[in-house]
Image (cartoon, grey):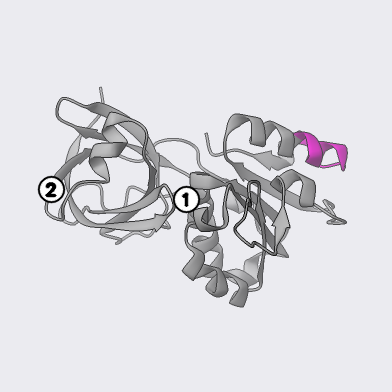
Amino acid sequence: MNDWHPTTVADVLPAADGLTELVLDIGGTPLVGTHRTPGQYVRLALPELGEGIFALASPPEPFRTRWEFLLKGGSPLADTLIRLQPGAKVNSSRPEGRGFPLLQARGKNLLLFATGSGISPIRCVIESIRQERSAYGEVTLYFGARTPKAFAYEDELHHWEAANIRVVRTVSQPGESGWQGLTGYVQTHLGEVSVEDAVAFVCGQSGMVQEVMDALRLRGLPREAIHLNY
């Protein structure tokens, strides 16, 4: 049985085509301080709509009173959550899952892979890295989206790059958008990147995750150095 706690909607904001940012205020609840590892998720629930699993997009901090999420519509629960107004109540569990093992990445190069809404737990990792950037080697984010307008957190990319985090973006369905950047899938753009002394964190749909893992292992990265957040 889940340990449910009432939270309050602080904000609902458009994040990208098909994606919405949900911010929950957890102040004054036992949830404060329970998010300890980047990549963890919580269960959110609404009456009569049941519960769903949503990854935390905000970094774990002991006194943080707001949790951020990136929601993709398509289910009754998600569709209702993104239509809520500030002040509405949402039940939340404590964070679950093993998350990404940042401790194992300290002192090493870090390869991050995300597509679509899978950027939310990777964003959590990036924000944690930015707080102590010198503890890590080279950090590269391979970020894929279907269209140029489907990249969430686009206004944060320059902050990430300013922290010496290389961002490689690719679009799988550019169409007539005029997109001048890379096209195709993230796993096809590894280039000459070295996997020596590297750790990889991967988040996305199952097919993408498997293909990224296969590409990394072909380059010599052992399976134990490739991590998922669940």
Main SS of the magenta segment? helix
Q: Is residue 158 left or right of residue 153?
A: right
**Real-space CA distance between mark 2 and mark 1, rounded to the nearest whole angstrom:** 22 Å
Tag on residue 120? 1
Task: Give the residue type that dot 2 points to.
Answer: Ala
| Residue 169 in sight in this render | yes
- Give the secondary structure at mark 2: loop
Task: Give the residue type that dot 1 points to.
Answer: Ser
Q: Is residue 214 above or below residue 29?
A: above
Name the residue beneath numbered marker 2. 88
Residue 145 screen position, x and y as percent: 58, 49
Residue 206 screen position, x and y as percent: 60, 30
Which numbered disc flags the more N-terminal residue, 2 or 1?
2
The residue stretch that appears in magenta: 214-223
Q: Kindly identify the residue that appears in the image at 74 percent across and 44 percent down.
A: 187
Residue 136 screen position, x and y as percent: 67, 64
- Give the secondary structure at mark 1: helix
What is the crowding at mark 1: few (fewer than 14 residues within 10 Å), some, or many (at least 20)?
Answer: many
